[in-house]
Image (cartoon, grey):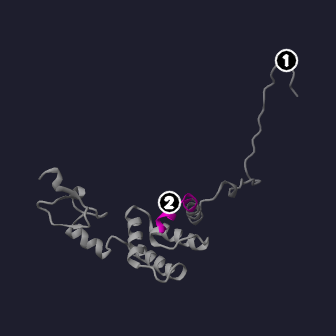
Amino acid sequence: MGKQTDIKTCRYINCKHPDKKIDITKDDYKLVGKTAYYHSDCLKEKKKGEWKDEQTKNDLQYIKNQWVLHISKTVVYSQLFSCLNELLARGVSSDYLVFVFDYIVKNNLNLRHPLGFKYFVDKPNIKDAYEKQQKAKNGIKKQSDFTADDSSDAPTFKLNQKPFGFKSILGGGKQ
């Protein structure tokens, strides 16, 4: 291996190379911008969008279509998808992105530019609303939804207590 400055890290989230390391003296790599290093095969895969499953692709198209309907017909698609892809690369689910977008539209929140979308993703009130929706969707009930079962065929128990105190000394308590 070369010097430490010759070793870079591949920026592709699904890099299949060991430790995501790129030795720029011998590996086949591409530099995107001034600091983003990728293995050549990783960059091809990233550009094809192979790291996205069908549901993710559908969710992104949904956001794009809804953006045109509700926010702006002149949105720059490359900016929108760049922002969405960055959020996905950080581990945010596409399902959550759809929820955030729908929340913004439903609540008439002020969103005019794709880069502003990421600020809504971190808002605690939106995260809480999403958690509530997920719990409802998964059938998790709140405590008040549980009821005690008082069925008449439940076994009953009787406790025969021995007398205590002066009654036990004086032989009282027998019936």
**Figure quadrant of the C terminus:** top right
170 with respect to 49 (left or right): right
Mark 1 residue type: Phe
Q: Is residue 122 magenta?
A: yes
**Residue ID at (73%, 50%):** 154
Where is residue 94, by image quadrant? bottom left
Our reading of the magenta stretch's main secondary structure is helix
Dot 2 alpha-carbon crowd within 10 angstroms: few under 14, some 14 to 19, many 20 or more? few
**Residue ID at (20%, 69%):** 40
Count of numbered labels shown in the rendering = 2
Give 156 or 98, whichever is nearer the viewer.
98
Give 14 or 24, whichever is nearer the viewer.
24
Which residue is label 2 attached to?
122
Answer above or below: position of 137 versus 60: above
Circles 2 and 1: CB atoms closer than 8 Å: no
Mark 2 residue type: Asp
If you read the primary sequence from the N terminus, does the residue marked by circle 2 or circle 1 appear first? 2
Residue stretch in magenta: 116-127
Where is residue 41, by image quadrant? bottom left
**Residue ID at (29%, 64%):** 12
Answer above or below: position of 136 versus 64: above
